[in-house]
């Protein structure tokens, strides 16, 4: 794809939008994919095909142990027995943001992931800390 971008930039100095590049790459992938062959593969053949691809290797136990679990906002909320609105209100998260996370439209950023982990670990402490903050008893360290 980089080569295509360079080519387009050289010819007439035109730049493609991200959507146009995505559409072109998708179209290229569709025309170069032998879908009939893929659909005819058994599960075993598909697995072996994936294992033979150096860019598609399964995670080793060592690599898997180093991965950090992404908190699942919906699972956290459901474990507390709360609606989206109640969870959002309790933890001061915009309900639209929570919906986007739960539907996979957006992924929480690193600060939100950390916040969700804290909520999951000790929701009562988070509620208490938020209440103290609303009352103006914020301690300043430094």
Image (cartoon, rainbow, N blue to C red):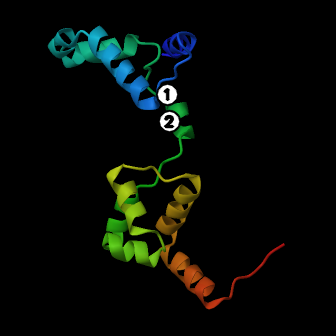
**Quadrant of the rendering where the C terminus is positioned:** bottom right
Residue at image point 59% right, 80% down: 129
Residue most extreme to the bottom: 135
Quick check: 134 above or below 42? below
Distance between mark 1 and mark 2 Cα atoms = 6 Å
Q: Are marks 1 and 2 in contact (CB under 8 Å)?
A: yes
Image location of residue 133, percent across then percent down: 62, 83
The answer to whether any part of residue 76 appears in the image is no
Density class for disc 2 (Cα within 10 Å; few <14, some 14-19, many ≥20) is few
Quick check: 100 above or below 86? above
Residue at which label 2 appears: 64
Residue at which label 1 appears: 60
Density class for disc 1 (Cα within 10 Å; few <14, some 14-19, many ≥20) is few
Quick check: 106 above or below 140? above
- Where residue 82 sits, quadrant-wise, is bottom left
Image location of residue 65, percent across then percent down: 53, 39
Residue at image point 56% right, 85% down: 131
Report the number of numbered marks: 2
- Where residue 9 sits, quadrant-wise, is top right
The answer to whether any part of residue 142 appears in the image is yes
Image location of residue 77, percent across then percent down: 36, 67
């Amino acid at each position: 794809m980089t080569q295509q971008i360079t080519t387009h930039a050289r010819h007439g100095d035109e730049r493609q939008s991200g959507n146009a590049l995505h559409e072109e790459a998708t179209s290229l992938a569709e025309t170069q994919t032998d879908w009939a062959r893929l659909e005819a593969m058994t599960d075993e053949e598909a697995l072996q095909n994936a294992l033979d691809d150096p860019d598609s290797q399964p995670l080793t136990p060592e690599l898997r142990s180093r991965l950090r679990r992404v908190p699942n906002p919906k699972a956290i909320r459901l474990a507390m027995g709360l609606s989206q609105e109640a969870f959002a209100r309790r933890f001061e998260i915009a309900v639209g943001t929570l919906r986007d996370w739960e539907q996979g439209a957006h992924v929480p950023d690193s600060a939100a992931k950390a916040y969700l982990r804290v909520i999951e670990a000790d929701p009562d402490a988070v509620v208490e800390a938020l209440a103290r903050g609303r009352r103006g008893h914020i301690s300043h360290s430094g």
